[in-house]
Image (cartoon, rainbow, N blue to C red):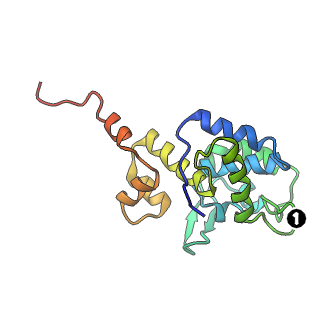
Amino acid sequence: MVYNSKPLRTQDQINDVLFYLRRTRYPERDTFLFLLGINTGLRCSDVVRLKIGTLRHSKRPEITEKKTGKKMTLFLDNVQDIVIEYTDGKDDDDWAFPSSYDSSKYISVQNVYKLFKRIDEQLGRIGLTTHTMRRTFGLWYYRKTKNIYYLMELFNHSSQAITMRYIGLTEDELGDSLEGFRLGY
């Protein structure tokens, strides 16, 4: 499901996605899912499996990744305000992202993909998929910190090259990073 997946490179793109998510049949759930995804870097398969209690009781809960089976710390410090607002009034055992058909189940990654595909078409095919959330987190984290090693660790990648390719660093961005760099005047 990673076909043509791209990170959202501008705040306007993020705002455009949020605009459409706030107009879905389940705007609170869908918007929170997206915001959690772009602010934590979790895979969609891990986001949808979260329980309210996991989000509510710790700023840094430990979860087990579905893909790798490895334990990892989920860093929620930067999104505490929206976590508190979203979890208010919900039971700890509830799925954070319940299925629209059966609240005893969580929304499937396939259904999130379908939702994002519809929004992607409305936005002129910008490359919005379930992986876009993770890639967007990675690109913006790297832009802010320039720390590819930490990002590699957060993503559990085996090399910096994989992480750089994953977040879609372009030649233009690499060239821009050299702006004002000159030795031997």
In what element is the residue under mark 1? loop
Q: Residue 132, position in %: x, y? A: 58, 52
Given residues 18 and 85, the one toward you in this image is 18
**Type of the residue with mark 1:** Ser
Task: Identify the residue at horizontal 63%, vertical 52% (top origin).
Answer: 37
Label 1 CA crowd tier, 10 Å (few <14, some 14–19, many 20+) = few
Task: Identify the residue at horizontal 15%, vertical 31% (top origin).
Answer: 183
List the single residue furthest toward the top: 185
List the single residue furthest toward the left: 184
Given residues 45 and 118, the one toward you in this image is 118
Task: Identify the residue at horizontal 73%, vertical 48% (top origin).
Answer: 32
The quadrant the N terminus occupies is bottom right
Q: Is residue 95 left or right of residue 44?
A: right
Name the residue beneath numbered marker 1.
103
Given residues 35 and 85, the one toward you in this image is 35
Q: Residue 21, position in %: x, y? A: 75, 44
* Quadrant of the rendered image containing residue 74: bottom right
Q: Is residue 128 left or right of residue 32?
A: left
